[in-house]
Amino acid sequence: MQSPVQGRLLYRVPYADTDQMKFVYYANYLVYFERARNELMRSLGLPYRELEARGYGLPVITAHVDYKAPAAYDDELELRASVGWLRGVRMQVDCQILCDGRLLASGYTIHAVMNMATHHATRLPDDLAAIFTNGITAEEACP
Amino acid sequence: MQSPVQGRLLYRVPYADTDQMKFVYYANYLVYFERARNELMRSLGLPYRELEARGYGLPVITAHVDYKAPAAYDDELELRASVGWLRGVRMQVDCQILCDGRLLASGYTIHAVMNMATHHATRLPDDLAAIFTNGITAEEACP
Amino acid sequence: MQSPVQGRLLYRVPYADTDQMKFVYYANYLVYFERARNELMRSLGLPYRELEARGYGLPVITAHVDYKAPAAYDDELELRASVGWLRGVRMQVDCQILCDGRLLASGYTIHAVMNMATHHATRLPDDLAAIFTNGITAEEACP
Amino acid sequence: MQSPVQGRLLYRVPYADTDQMKFVYYANYLVYFERARNELMRSLGLPYRELEARGYGLPVITAHVDYKAPAAYDDELELRASVGWLRGVRMQVDCQILCDGRLLASGYTIHAVMNMATHHATRLPDDLAAIFTNGITAEEACP
């Protein structure tokens, strides 16, 4: 059975992330998604910093979050990301936020593939595109 | 012609909101949405602080942002929000972020109406519900 | 009597800035200081964006905050900044945060004057230095 | 030789923490200090969440940061905190931020010891005070 490569990160919630409802403020989940995406790209063997060094960026054009249960101060969250799809000049990354194995939030970001020199949308060269598409179907190594 | 009541706010972008791509970081748009919602509720005559004093909260259950053009340091943004709909125990607020009349981002948040004492979803009493539904169809006074 | 030119800004506290103690989280005061500095430079006739366009930056080398009373959600804060001193390649900006005329926090930031091309500390040219030093002793126009 | 108990945490810098100068925005260091304090209290055997459950809080009354070298996106930072002193109703925590063994920033926070029910400053009971004072002089176990 195949499952996509995942970025995974444990993250301890600081006071900074909470608001006066005593739970994590909703915008912070998009930061959690970014932390998971960074680890996803590291897991794929292409840290985002290297993608930038190759001249490409992945600015977010759509972000979506469904909040199912709140996270609280000092919770140790598991932040997960995987490649959803890569088509032409666009890519989707799917994310989940869990605590003790329970899903707290899920969502996705859609990214434009951008040539950082021209600031125009562009297709990735085949070798870089393969890294993402292989990540979708690759059997993940045991942790 | 009728247009909904809007919350409107001018907001100057600090360095704090930017990232190393030299534009506003994507999660900050959800904070901008919140700032606009706060002004919307003030415009409706029911500041969120008063709604809480009445025993109700509006936690976010879905957030969605479409990013069309970037915002930069020192830009003076216009943050706008209006009530999309109120049905049963749920409500949608629509938001737009503009700069110099140009749309930079749009999106929405869906909220549960929550009884803050029981933490259960609940319908708003008629007088409070009317404030929101009137806001959808009310002809807005000239600014 | 002379008083220094001040940057002043009214700022409404969003949920985003609060934490589960129900007050503004302490790190956000440094963002408030930045917002006040931005307005100070605009008041001096030299927005920070223009200083950067002239090739200079003012990275923070020390920050200090004394917290006297808490700020809460929906408070309308007054953020104030003024030039403390400019000596050689360093400058201090003094900041106060008030609510309803009551001092909530005060502090300062010390900045290096940096040539952004070389990333070395440098003295400002006389015309730019005068803008800051005049700001210290100038009689402020009535608001 | 004795050295104080330290809170230590590895932390990967996300895009969220950077600004358009391409380095970590200065206010984020106070969040890093908080993350390190949380780990310090866990290392002392008294997680902050438990201190709160005992009825005490440690609101910050002074914060100070000296910035020596910048941190960048994707850097893996080491966040460190140790108890500086506990005297009467006040306590200092000292913090350092490092990258690859190099000191990027240092500073401290001074906290009031607060009875969370009365919101008044108070002395800690002896058993809790001992946890902090022992942390200052205890020989730290090998990592």
Image: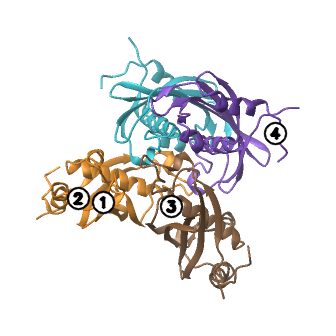
Chain colours: A purple, B cyan, C orange, D brown
Residue identifier under label 4: A140
Front tag of 3 and 1: 1
Label 3: element kind? helix
Q: Are marks 3 and 4 in contact (CB under 8 Å)?
A: no
Q: Amino acid at mark 4?
A: Glu
Name the residue at the bottom extreme.
Answer: D1
Query: Which mark is on residue D30?
Result: 3
Q: Position of residue B1 (x, y in %)?
A: 38, 11
Instruction: Give the class, few, some or many, for how many residues have Cα within 10 Å of label 2's Cα (few <14, many ≥20).
Output: some
Visible residue check, residue D135? yes
| Residue D141 image-quadrant placement | bottom right
Q: Secondary structure at mark 4?
A: loop
The residue beneath circle 1 is C113
Residue at the (39%, 38%) spot, across then down? B72
Measure the C-alpha gap from mark 3 to mark 1.
23 Å
Q: Quadrant of residue C79?
A: bottom left
* Dot 3 crowding, Cα within 10 Å, few <14, some 14–19, many 20+: many
Badge 1: chain ID: C
Q: Look at label 2 and name its amino acid.
A: Leu
